[in-house]
Amino acid sequence: MSKINQTPIEEPLALALDGRIPPAVFLLTGCVAVIGCNSLVLSPIAPEVSRSLDASVQGVMIASAAFGLGTAGSALFLARHIDRLGAWRMLRLAFAALAAALGVSALAPVLAVLVAAQLVAGLAAGVALPAIYTNAATVAPAGRETETVGIVLTGWTLSLVAGVSLSAVLADILHWRAVFTLVCLLAVGAFLILALNGRRDTPSGEPAMAPLAALRTPGLLPLLLACGAFMASFYGVYGYIGAHLAGALGKPVSANGLLTLVYGLGFGGAVLLDRPVQRLGAHNLLPFAFAFVAAIYLFMMWGAHSFGILLAVAFVWGLANHLGLNMLIVRLSGIAPARRGAIMGLNSATTYIAAFAGTLGFGPVYAGFGLPAAAAMAALLTLVAALSAAR
């Protein structure tokens, strides 16, 4: 499959900026933040939504599950068209659909409408995320791919710190519908900037790959296995650490918010390390990054009964996860540039399937043996990721 030809407007701006980070990178960062906000805001406002729509909190969280399911399915079956139609075009279409879905979410009169709207939002996100990562690799100045992807990944930090914190406050002051309205307006703004930023793609003219055809790309399967193990371990621990703080340590709900904030600061602060990592060779450091994350889980297992230790671990955990995710995306995006959209789609699909499997699979471990056992299981999975990446 031939690589999409770029028009003169589409040439990386780095050529005109003497290797500096192109402004488009910060647009992509904002796009990630919008998607992250929608994926994270429902949990803290679920009680308000349940009262408003006369449904249970568990029922409301079905909408969150629908978002994840839609993202995984879309990334697997629709993201492959990025290579044929162009990453910028697909990103614009995805954000138009995302904005519409968020508008319906804000106006949803019953739970079923909210669930359907979040499913559509997931379908849009499953195309948008691979398109974002594909564009990040395209516009990155030569030799600064790791730093560029690292900046884009800070969008998750923005959504984690601002989205989770502000959504609960906004729901308390105004209404839960105001939360989705605000995220919808952010999505509309991102779409308008994407539509007017002058970047256009030239379609390749070749048919899209079959959904799983990219799996035949040499070296891809071990990296996807590493991605799955890495993400399952994260979501498996992250999903239950709040329950551990409340149940085992007797902390208030606000303690979980503080731990999430510290994790987000570590994740975002790691961007300062991306340039040194780039010089050392991100491709070769990925197994060591995963091994470092495994060591953090072991330390978490040891310090699980101290809130102070868990806060310190959360900061380093966020930092290490940023480095691991960054290097993984750089590795995946460099395997086969002509198939980059399909490969990034498989990466996103693997991520969301692993999130579902990790949350589900770690539940019995946590219920039976607590957070230390869950952290030990995460360490084992992350070592599997390290060994797979080393291949």
Image: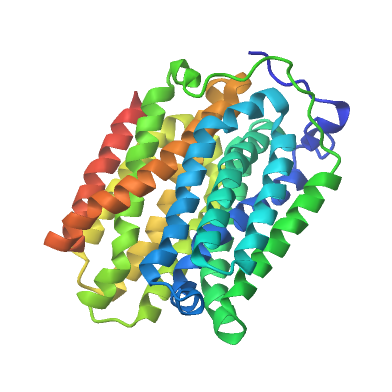
Image coords of residue 210 (percent x, y): 53, 19
Image coords of residue 318 (percent x, y): 43, 57
- Relative to 4, say whether 288 is above or below: below
Q: Which residue is drawn at 82% across and 45% down?
A: 195
Scheme by which the image is coloured: rainbow
User: Which quadrant of the figure contains the C terminus?
Assistant: top left
The quarter of the picture where residue 208 lies is top right
Q: Residue at x 39, y 71 (%)?
A: 57
Q: Nearer the viewer, residue 42 or 32?
A: 42
The quarter of the picture where residue 141 lies is top right
| Image side of residue 201 versus residue 237, left or right | right
Q: Which residue is drawn at 57% across and 19% down?
A: 209
| Image side of residue 52 versus residue 259, left or right | right
- Relative to 262, say whether 357 is above or below: above
Q: Can residue 301 be seen by looking at this rendering?
A: yes
Q: Residue at x 52, y 58 (%)?
A: 39
Image coords of residue 206 (percent x, y): 69, 14
Q: Which of 152 and 201 is in front in this view?
A: 201
